[in-house]
Amino acid sequence: MLSSPRLLARLITAMAIVACSNLWAQSELDDATKSLKARNYPAAQALLEKTLKATPNNADALALMGELQLATRAPEKAVEYADKAIAVDPTKSRYHLLRGNALGMRAQQVSMLRALTMVGDIRGAYEKAVELDARSRPARFALFNFFLIAPSVAGGGLDKAQSFAEQTASVDAAASHQMKGQILMRQKKPESAYAAFKQALAADPRLPSIHNSMGYLAIELKQFDTALEHFQKQAELEPDNANSFDSLADGWLAKGKPDEAAAAYRKALAINPLYASSLRGLGKALEQAGRTQEAIAHYRHCVQIGTQNSLNSVVSDSKARLEALGA
């Protein structure tokens, strides 16, 4: 029988080993997160596979692997990893959000009839994410956008979106005003929408998505300089987000400045070389600048990338430009 001092020493050693193992796993997860954010997907996958081999029930690693599958347009695998993470820890809002996002992407890849059978699960995942973390903006906007986009027969509709926007006011005033602005945009009331977005901006001046919404609304109102101000602010707040520079480029293009637009699209593509929207936009900018052959090359690249990732609207737009150019 072990003496008490020797037993205590073994317990301390075991605890130290567990602590070191946890620290190692967290370090691997931190590195995987950085690789995922930098879109170095092979590195992220290698790190996550290593972590999961050592700790197969690591919920955060399972969820990150799901996010990796989502980033590489493999939603079925993303759902599998989300479900595994939820099975380990059902209390994490972001795991349910991941599941909803993965199901939503999958619904875009299947037939309309099949997609309709999935909407209940999508809504349920988002509702659970909000229930578990009422202050999570990603979860709240995911559920709001579901209500805004889904038809009433699928559980969506403007009435539900409006009700949810009102409910959100008690926990996040800026998000509530932004939601109301998006509803007003759907109702073709740009001036009222702009006023709602201004209220959102007053509540939270550092919310990048507000500047994005106001920028595109300003374009619709033919206020191009105002649009550029908002897009530039968004780029300052999110300098590592390709969408920030893609939007800024859209602003320059709307103002009739194709050279400035091309420079901004190239910045977006430097952040994410596979960003189909910027490939299409760069094609448009080059076409407007009279550089037709370069434009055709970017349109073709956009069609290739967009087809691989089921980005139908981007693909059809680029195909239309290629046809118009006789390419």
Image (cartoon, rainbow, N blue to C red):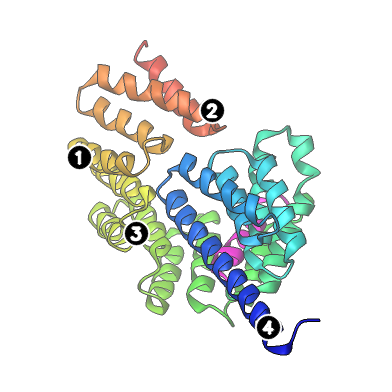
Instruction: State the CA–CA distance, disc 3 to disc 2.
Output: 27 Å
Image position, residue 306 (x, y; %)? 49, 30
- Residue indicated by mark 3: 238
Instruction: State the CA–CA distance, disc 4 to disc 1.
Output: 77 Å
Q: Amino acid at mark 4?
A: Arg
Vertical relation: 34 (above or below) 317: below
Query: Could you tell me which secondary element the residue under label 1 belongs to?
Result: loop
Image position, residue 235 (x, y; %)? 30, 57
Q: Amino acid at mark 1?
A: Lys
Disc nearer the start of the sequence (3/2): 3
Disc nearer the start of the sequence (2/4): 4
Circle 2 or circle 4, nearest the eye: 4
Query: Could you tell me which secondary element the residue under label 2 belongs to?
Result: helix
Instruction: State the CA–CA distance, disc 2 to disc 1.
Output: 31 Å
Q: Do the residues under discs 2 and 1 have CB atoms within 8 angstroms?
A: no
- Residue indicated by mark 4: 6
Classify residue 255 by image quadrant.
top left
Residue beneath the point at 46% across and 43% down: 43
Q: Give the label on residue 134, or none.
A: none
Q: Amino acid at mark 3?
A: Glu
* Quadrant in which the N terminus is drawn: bottom right
- Residue indicated by mark 1: 257
Q: Is residue 149 magenta?
A: yes
In the depicted view, which residue is nearer to us: 42 or 253? 42
Classify residue 267 by image quadrant.
top left
Q: Give the label on residue 308, or none.
A: 2
